[in-house]
Amino acid sequence: MCERGRRPAVGGYATMIIAVAVMVLPLVWMVLASFKDMDELYRLPIQWLPESLAPANYGTATQTVPFGSFFVNSAIATVLGAGLKMTLGLMTAYALVFVDIPFRRFFFYVVVCALLVPQQIVLIPNYALAAELGWLNTYQGLIVPGLASAFGTFLFRQHFLTLPRSILEAAEIDGAGHWRRLWRFVVPLSGPTIAAVGLVSIVTEWNDYLWPLLVIDRPEMMTLPVGLTLLMNFDGVPNWGVIMAGTVLVTVPVLAVFFLLQRRIVAGLVTGAVTG
């Protein structure tokens, strides 16, 4: 009986180790490759460890393209985009749960349907609208078309259904309006869910490539993922060590945010998972 119990456990650990290796090894290779010159990268058999840890590729990457400008543009788009997405998601979900509005279940189904629509389908209509409004190569064109977050609204709504209504009813009796109830009572009780939605929004905005590629063609307005393409075209020959160095610089801020919020992420994603 004990042997039978150990076999599934060993199989589970082996599967977990393989899954972690599949996810981690590309990141390890990216970091190691960022310290290699072109000869090392194309050498066979593959050499994992670089001969030197001199950060020459990082210096080349930051001097070849205006990384500072790219970073500022990405930071503005991420902070404003993720912040507004979360705010709109919070207010929409609050209205769907705590405000007695007609057809609110229908509006919730619209949100669910929006989750099923691939974002690529709306790229052309959004681009045409942004061009008509003169928003190409602007921050509003970069941020505004993606502010509606069906995922955030759905997750917040499912979490709000688990909150004790007695607290909000007591606040209503004390004269608190919807705005005060949302920010003074609902938001403080929703920390894990806010962290989960915040992380997803930050990662989505920071790593977004296709939409900024469409609406931005001036180097001074490019974000980091789009700016990396300039390294690919430098001198006509891609130096993968320099490209990997630039990719590390893009990846590190997102990883830092993930490690800061990791304790709350799982709790936020499973909260209200079985609530109808």
Image (tube, rainbow, N blue to C red):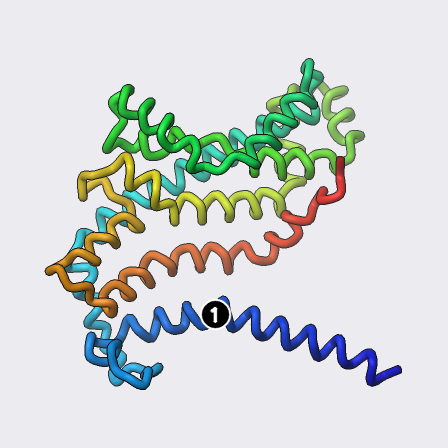
Residue extending farthest to the left is 235
User: Measured from the top left, where is residue 238 in percent x and y?
Assistant: 19, 63
Asked if residue 31 can be seen in this view, the reply is yes
On screen, residue 16 versus residue 256, left or right, reads right
Query: How many numbered discs sit on the rendered protein?
Result: 1
Viewer-proximal residue among 117 and 2: 117
> Residue at coordinates 11% horizontally, 60% vertically from top-left?
235
On screen, residue 257 versus residue 112, left or right, reads left
Residue extending farthest to the right is 1
Viewer-proximal residue among 245 and 124: 124
* Structural crowding at the residue carrying mark 1, measured as other residues with C-alpha within 10 Å and reported as few (<14), some (14–19) or many (≥20): few
On screen, residue 85 versus residue 3, left or right, reads left
Viewer-proximal residue among 179 and 83: 83
Q: Quadrant of the N terminus?
A: bottom right
On screen, residue 73 above or below 33? above
On screen, residue 119 above or below 101? below
On screen, residue 125 above or below 194? above
User: Measured from the top left, where is residue 180 in percent x and y?
Assistant: 62, 25
On screen, residue 65 versus residue 103, left or right, reads left
Identify residue type, mark 1.
Val
Residue extending farthest to the top is 102
> Residue at coordinates 31% horizontally, 40% vertically from top-left?
212
> Residue at coordinates 75% horizontally, 35% vertically from top-left?
276
The local secondary structure at tag 1 comes to helix
> Residue at coordinates 73% horizontally, 21% vertically from top-left?
172
Determine the image quadrant of residue 45.
Answer: bottom left
Asked if residue 183 can be seen in this view, the reply is no
User: Measured from the top left, where is residue 75 in percent x and y?
Assistant: 34, 45
Determine the image quadrant of residue 132.
Answer: top left
Residue linked to disc 1: 24
On screen, residue 39 above or below 224? below
User: Measured from the top left, where is residue 105 in percent x and y?
Assistant: 70, 23
